[in-house]
Image: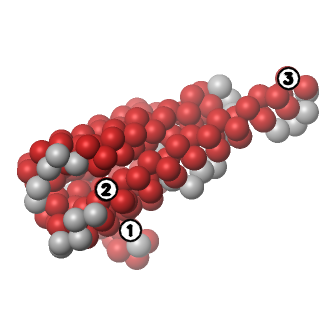
Amino acid sequence: MTRVVEPIARTLLRAGVTPNAVTVTGTLGVLVGSIALGARGYLVAGALVVTFFALTDLLDGTMARMRGGSSRFGAFLDSSMDRVSDGAVFGAVAYWLATQNDRVGVAAALICLVSGGLVSYVKARAEGLGMTCNVGIAERTERLLIVGVGGLLTGLGLDWALTTALWLLAAVSVFTVGQRMTHVYRQAQRAELGVDA
């Protein structure tokens, strides 16, 4: 991916495009793919558009590094826009499944929506308290890949694939929240006992 992303990042920077502009553009693309396509049942097209624009997450980060590091506002904007994108993806999936009367799928999508937000929040809160939280099996990229593959397969005719992917994702997301909370708890305990983390 580096060989692909770095030349694009350099070209955009030379053209005067900022990492923040790429972040916002990527979020708008994910919103269009989710709401205009995914929520209306165009699952293959929606998954492809969302995946394409979600890859801007790699691009804006690379651009920021090439400029000498991310600004504090850039990091804040990137994290905030990621939450908007995630909400759009899982909200659109939940909406479409509701139109198909798939209550089991809707339940899984809502669990993914909440637990995905928690995965990110727990890490951000821990880091805000001066601790680390770089653990967990369901990072944002993995979450988007799982739901994307489920959407693609359902769009190609495997009706059970999206709901199955969502339940798998719900399980690993809840597990990741538990992993992160346990990790932070142990650090906090060690800090209270005066032991180096």
Residue, far right: 194
The total number of labels drawn is 3
The residue carrying mark 2 is 163
Give me the C-alpha separation between circle 3 and circle 2.
43 Å
Q: Position of residue 151 (x, y in %)?
A: 25, 62
Residue found 41% across the figure and 53% down from its top: 167
Instruction: Work out whether mark 3 precedes mark 1 in sequence or the reverse, and give the earlier one.
Output: 1
The residue carrying mark 1 is 6
Instruction: Work out whether mark 3 precedes mark 2 in sequence or the reverse, and give the earlier one.
Output: 2
Quarter-of-image position of residue 83:
top left
Give me the C-alpha separation between circle 1 and circle 2.
36 Å
Q: Which of 168 and 12 is in front in this view?
A: 168
Residue found 29% across the figure and 59% down from its top: 162
Q: Where is residue 132 in the image (x, y as percent from the top left)?
A: 67, 39
Indicate the amino acid at tag 3: Glu
Indicate the amino acid at tag 2: Thr
Q: Where is residue 98 in the image (x, y as percent from the top left)?
A: 18, 43
The residue carrying mark 3 is 192
Depth-wise, is mark 3 or mark 1 nearer the camera?
3
Element on which disc 2 rests = helix
Element on which disc 1 rests = helix
Give me the C-alpha separation between circle 3 and circle 1.
44 Å
- Quadrant in which the C terminus appears: top right
